[in-house]
Amino acid sequence: MIGEPSEVTNEMIQEVNEVLPTGKVRYLMGCGYPEDILEAVSLGVDLFDCVLPTRNGRTGMAFTTKGKIIIKASMYAKDRAPLDENCTCYTCRHFTRAYLRHLFNTGEILAGRLVSYHNIHFFQQLMAGIRHSISEGSFVDFKKEVSEHFNFRD
């Protein structure tokens, strides 16, 4: 739920699940952090939408398989690696962290677009991984593995 602590959101999901008819799609608006999505899925939520991937992308925060990256940080000034070495998106295949940082620091609008594009791809891959792990019966292991990299807020 938008603006509520994760614990309150999870309590509300459980409450709502008790009164919703079984077999119906459960939708949660405003849930966007990977660890919150994973927890909501474990509580039975099926569908999400959130501005987080693009809002954070426009301000220089990228979600990666190793956690978040604030690409404007000086530590990336000479970093020739992609945002996420495990990612196949256009941004990661064509631009380095150093170049993305440069774009942000010069006020180039392309910077936010490229990181937003990456973030959307990241979340599409996360959801594909969730669907696959559910169909394989390995969601608990998948959740644990992904959650080890995400315990933060902006």
Image (cartoon, rainbow, N blue to C red):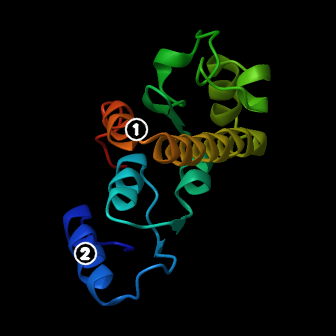
Q: Which residue is mark 2?
A: 14
* Distance of label 2 from label 1 (alpha carbons): 22 Å
How busy is the neighbourhood of tag 2: few (under 14 within 10 Å), some, or many (20 plus)?
Answer: some
In the foreground, 118 or 14: 14
Which amino acid lies under the numbered mark 2 shown in the image of this protein? Gln
Kindly identify the residue that appears in the image at 60 percent across and 44 percent down.
Answer: 128
In the foreground, 43 or 29: 43
Query: In the picture shown, does residue 88 fall above or below 133?
Result: above
On the image, the x and y values in percent for residue 121 come to: 67, 42
Residue 5 in the figure: left or right of residue 113: left
Residue 30 in the figure: left or right of residue 153: right
Which amino acid lies under the numbered mark 1 shown in the image of this protein? Ser
On the image, the x and y values in percent for residue 134 come to: 47, 47
Badge 2 vs badge 1, beta-carbon distance below 8 Å: no
Q: Quadrant of the N terminus?
A: bottom left
How busy is the neighbourhood of tag 1: few (under 14 within 10 Å), some, or many (20 plus)?
Answer: few
Q: How many marks?
A: 2
Query: In the picture shown, does residue 103 fall above or below 27?
Result: above
Residue 117 visible in image = yes
Q: Quadrant of residue 7?
A: bottom left
In the foreground, 90 or 25: 25
Q: Quadrant of residue 109?
A: top right
On the image, the x and y values in percent for residue 49 come to: 56, 67
Residue 85 in the figure: left or right of residue 28: right
On the image, the x and y values in percent for residue 53 come to: 57, 52
Q: Which residue is mark 1?
A: 138
- Which mark is first along the chain, 1 or 2? 2
